[in-house]
Image (cartoon, grey):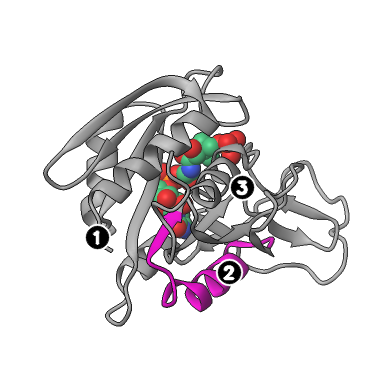
Amino acid sequence: EPATLLADVTITVTAGPTREPLDPVRFISNHSSGKMGYALAHAALMLGAKVNLISGPVNIEPPQGVNLVSVESAIQMRDAALKLAGSSDIFIGCAAVADYRVAQVAEQKIKKQGDEMTITMIKNPDIIAEVAGLTKNRPYTVGFAAETQNVEQYAKGKLKNKNLDMICANDVSNQALGFNSNNNALTLFWHDDSVELGIADKQALAMNVLLEIAKRLDF
Ligand code: PMT
């Protein structure tokens, strides 16, 4: 690939899970490894872009040359995203952001109590929808949709409701794909088009996602 296709382009990618704290020693999270998002950041660098990588806690090394911003919670990820979105040409939300956070984070470790316990959670801000809703310097905004059923219908719903330019849908009901595995398969949806990217390793898929985005932009 030409290493200059995305020269002078700034891309911000979110990757990995968020951690929503319950108390100083516990959190609620998910199985995102960061592999898909880190592959996107790596592919963007290979195409000559300047890359910001906003990452939740993961166990993989960031690609060399990336501006890594490490965060834990969805609120922290939102703050980092809004700081960088306005100076980005493309924003890709690949992170598995928790939809809810614990309403009241305990200051001290929660003690064992009766036989049941109830945790009240409240909605987190929708980071990708906030980026797509920017009225000034709005980047080309790309989301991901992790679905276990009705993949096309739910992905298209998110494309529309979050006002995205594009969404990458993956079926995460198959354990060999999606969360944590090295391979994935994606269907890309725009408001008027779609492209099927069959099973491949995340590096190859990431490159193809970026080439599809580049085709649709005039820089
Ligand atoms: O990290 P890996 O192990 O490699 O796995 C990759 C992946 C399966 C996590 C990735 O391919 C993926 O699908 N990422 C999105 C996961 C997700 O949370 O999807 P969602 O359908 O719940 O969210 C839809 C979109 O809204 C996503 O772009 C998400 O980043 C965004 N979102 C969701 C909630 C929220 N509060 N803010 C958001 O910005």
Q: Position of residue 30 (x, y in %)?
A: 63, 41
Q: Mark 1 points at which residue?
A: 163
Q: What stretch is highlighted in magenta?
A: 71-92
Give the mark nearer the N terminus: 1 vs 3.
3
Q: Mark 3 points at which residue?
A: 16
Asked if disc 1 and disc 2 are in contact, CB closer than 8 Å, the reply is no
Circle 1 residues within 10 Å: few <14, some 14–19, many ≥20: some
Q: Nearer the viewer, mark 1 or mark 2?
A: 1
Which amino acid type is marked by label 2?
Ile
Q: Where is residue 141 in the image (x, y as percent from the top left)?
A: 34, 59
Horizontal arrangement in the rendering, residue 3 relative to residue 106 (left or right): left
Q: Distance between the residues labelled 1 and 2?
A: 21 Å
Horizontal arrangement in the rendering, residue 139 relative to residue 77 (left or right): left
- What numbered label is drawn on residue 75? 2
Q: Tag 3's secondary structure?
A: loop
Q: Is mark 3 within 8 Å of ligand 1?
A: yes
- What numbered label is drawn on residue 135? none
Q: Nearer the viewer, mark 3 or mark 2?
A: 3
Instruction: Count every numbered label the image shows and give the total.
Output: 3
Front residue of 199 and 109? 199
Q: Tag 1's secondary structure?
A: loop
Which amino acid type is marked by label 1?
Asn
Q: How far apart are marks 1 and 3 (CA)?
A: 22 Å
